[in-house]
Image (cartoon, rainbow, N blue to C red):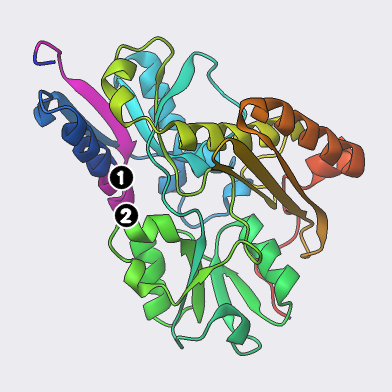
Amino acid sequence: MSELQKIVVGIRSSNLSISQTNLLIQELLKQDQNLDKDIFDIKTIKTTGDVHNTRRLDQIGGKGLFIKEIEDQIMSGQIDIGVHSMKDVPAQDVYPDLDIICWMQRHKSNDALISNSGKSFMDLPSGSVIGTSSIRRRSQVLSLRKDLSIKLLRGNVDTRIQKLKNNEYDAVILSLAGLARLNLDHLATEELEHNLFLPSACQGAVGVQALKGSEVKKILAPINDLKTQTECIAERRVLKNINANCNSPVSVYASINKNNISLKIEMFDHVGNKIFKKSKEGLEENYLELCDELSEEIINTLGQKKINELDNLKSDFDYTP
């Protein structure tokens, strides 16, 4: 591989993005002893989502804003690949010429609670202030405990934890995978189980994006995790089929066990009512058909108009009981 030129890697300018990219390169070097780590030239890119880090994402264009500038630079040839937290990548492709060419093995997909008191979610005192920027998590909190307050929390993981330490919040909800990749998972008070907080599509998964047909795909092939790839494609397919986006209060999770795949989905309205819940199982080889069947059930039950209305929270994000 030494004859290859530099591979320019575009990532967000956050500690988590840097950590995830370093893990990817380390895994690759383990698999291919002939690969020189210096072949990778990491370029940090300020995305719109990072610049506007105090405003609600749904009001400035959605989570696609965490990858827009990176995608633009892949398309223009300024970088070769982008490394993304896949939960930040909208299911509806902006650029059909781009593809996820590698899926790293998924970490645990669970959310995690960090509380100043050390109390678990269900034991938090009434009126406790929960910090999150996720409309999904907001609806899940309201579904379980309408006696808690919710306050918008933007910024990277380090910023959010610092705001918690400053007592601006009583507890925050973050991705367990993100904490683990920053070696901060010891801070988690509680790993939130799927029966309470089913995760967003692709939570815990890291993907590499490039132009379709990119030669880099061959280089990354040794670390592509097919199980993660299938599970995440399934989750994204359901979102795409029902025209839901990263701002919708929708949880979808696929898991493969032996030759079978299980698909779970939960949907909420913006005041915390669970309006759809379904699990389906089938053979892994038929996963696309399973996704399409589930998607059809959702649309037939709720109607596309209702689903579209969930894409944006029209009221104030903050909630006080």
Q: Which residue is drawn at 51% across and 36% down?
A: 89
User: In the rendered structure, does residue 12 fall within the stretch colored magenta?
Assistant: yes
Check disc 2 and give the amino acid type: Arg
Q: Give the range drawn in magenta.
A: 3-20
Q: Residue at x 68, y 31 (%)?
A: 240
Q: Do the residues labelled 1 and 2 touch (CB within 8 Å)?
A: yes
Task: Residue at the far front: name it.
Answer: 258
* Mark 1 nearby-residue class (10 Å; few <14, some 14–19, many ≥20): many
Q: Is residue 207 visible?
A: yes
* Above/below status of 197 relative to 46: below
* Above/below status of 108 relative to 294: below
Of the 4 image quadrants, the one containing the N terminus is: top left
Indicate the position of residue 68 as horizontal and vertical percent values: 46, 31
In terms of sequence position, does the residue under pointer 1 or pointer 2 come before the other?
1
Q: What kind of element bears circle 1?
A: helix
Given residues 255 and 138, the one toward you in this image is 255
Q: Which residue is drawn at 48% across and 36% down?
A: 227
Q: Distance between the residues labelled 1 and 2?
A: 7 Å
Given residues 72 and 122, the one toward you in this image is 122
- Which residue corresponds to mark 2? 181
Question: On the image, which quarter does residue 138 sit in?
Answer: bottom right
Q: Residue at x 61, y 34 (%)?
A: 234
Query: Does 216 sit left or right of 163 as displayed?
Result: left
- Which residue corresponds to mark 1? 20
